[in-house]
Amino acid sequence: MIEEVRHAHEAALEQVATALTLADLRAVDSEVLAKSGTLGSLKSRLGSLAIEHRKTVGQAINQAIEAVESAADERRRELSAAALQGRIAAERLDLTEITARPRRGHEHLAIQAWERLEDVFVGLGFQIAEGPELETDFYNFEALNMPRSHPARSGFDTLFTDYNEDGTVLLRTHTSPVQIRVMQTVEPPIYMIMPGRVFRRDTPDATHMPVFHQLEGLVIDRSITMAHLAGTIDAFTKAFFGGDFTSRLRPNYFPFTEPSAEFDIQRPDGTWIELGGCGMVHPNVLSAAGLDPEEWSGFAFGFGIDRMARERHGVDDIRDMYSNDVRFIKQF
Ligand code: FA5
């Protein structure tokens, strides 16, 4: 029987050593150590042995059981440690993506130009004002010397709202209505710019968008002349584009300024770019805004911010700026 104990002992140690999982080790308990197991069952046969052998065989069985139990405990610790390592490896998070330098976005081309323009004008001593995008007929047209029947109104392809049946609430077609709002609320002297989003029923093409941005300038003071206007435009041109750019005024017509001009800037290579409109604020506009034209005079100008950005970055088609194609946008 000693021989059987030795066999069962060796087989059990082998089973423990080759156990790959905790479940395999639990099988050792039931198959070897339990009452019906290979070692456990030997105990129940002790009674059939001659008395003088019982002690030796009994001790051999107990030693074998202890040895198997301690080998199983040791193996259980190994397997538990390995299982923990496996779980840690499986739950590992790759944080390199988070710690790597994130790719930063940037402001839209038009907003970049808008902010740079603000910086330049603030540097020239101007303050900034903004007005509503939803305007009334009074501010967008009437107060700007364009009464109902005025033909110049048709030059602005206006988007009307159905807020009022008579079409008196509209999306502003230019930033000039903010001039009126400023003159109504700010005591002259006024040196202000008014950037903002404007809307026209224009079909998109290389130089037109139905939604675009303008920057309005307004100066109201005593004894302001056309020379101040030309000087301001030129100071702005050099500050924004560079000292080798110059500007010129060409006669034009706007109902809200008299005289009116178109202003162009000249690139260092001699070519001209048309930028916007300007002129001396019309006396009717001063009156509509509550200022006495005998006491105050001033000039105003307005140009397209998107066209400016397009010019600055050499963008052929203004629509590309609004296509939201990152391959285009991330170039700037
Ligand atoms: C005006 O809107 C006048 N309010 C400007 C002005 C202000 C004149 C103060 C005198 C005194 P005009 O319609 O020309 O003018 O537009 C001015 C500029 O806006 C244009 O020169 C152009 O740069 C830009 N612009 C006009 N329409 C579009 C459009 N659909 N898409 C992009 N830019 C445009």
Image (cartoon, rainbow, N blue to C red):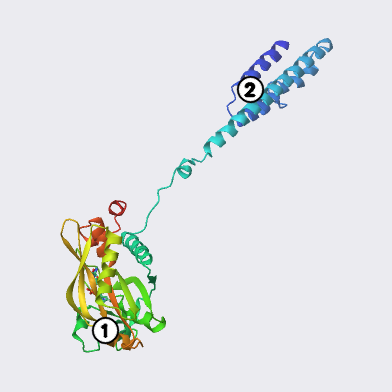
Disc 1 crowd, CA 10 A, few/some/many (<14, 14-19, 20+): many
**Ligand 1 occupies quarter:** bottom left
Pointers 1 and 2 in contact (C-beta within 8 Å): no
Q: With respect to residue 155, does 87 lie above or below?
A: above
Q: Which residue is mark 1?
A: 282
Which residue shows up at 32% across the image and 52% down it?
Answer: 330
Q: Nearer the viewer, residue 307 or 29?
A: 307
Indicate whether 142 appears above or below 214.
Answer: below
Q: Position of residue 111 (x, y in %)?
A: 34, 62
The answer to which quarter of the image holds residue 40 is top right
The quarter holding residue 153 reads: bottom left
Q: Mark 2 packing: few (<14 Cα in 10 Å), some, or many (20+)?
A: many
Q: Is residue 329 left or right of residue 104?
A: left
Q: What residue sits right under mark 2 in the picture?
A: 16
Residue drawn at x 28%, y 84% is 144
Instruction: State whether label 2 is within 8 Å of ligand 1.
Output: no
Residue at image position (27%, 69%) is: 231
Residue 92 in the image: state x and y as whole percent.
52, 38
Horizontal side of 124 relative to 4 (left or right) equals left
- In the picture, the quarter occupied by the N terminus is top right
Say which element carries label 1.
loop
Amino acid at pointer 2: Val
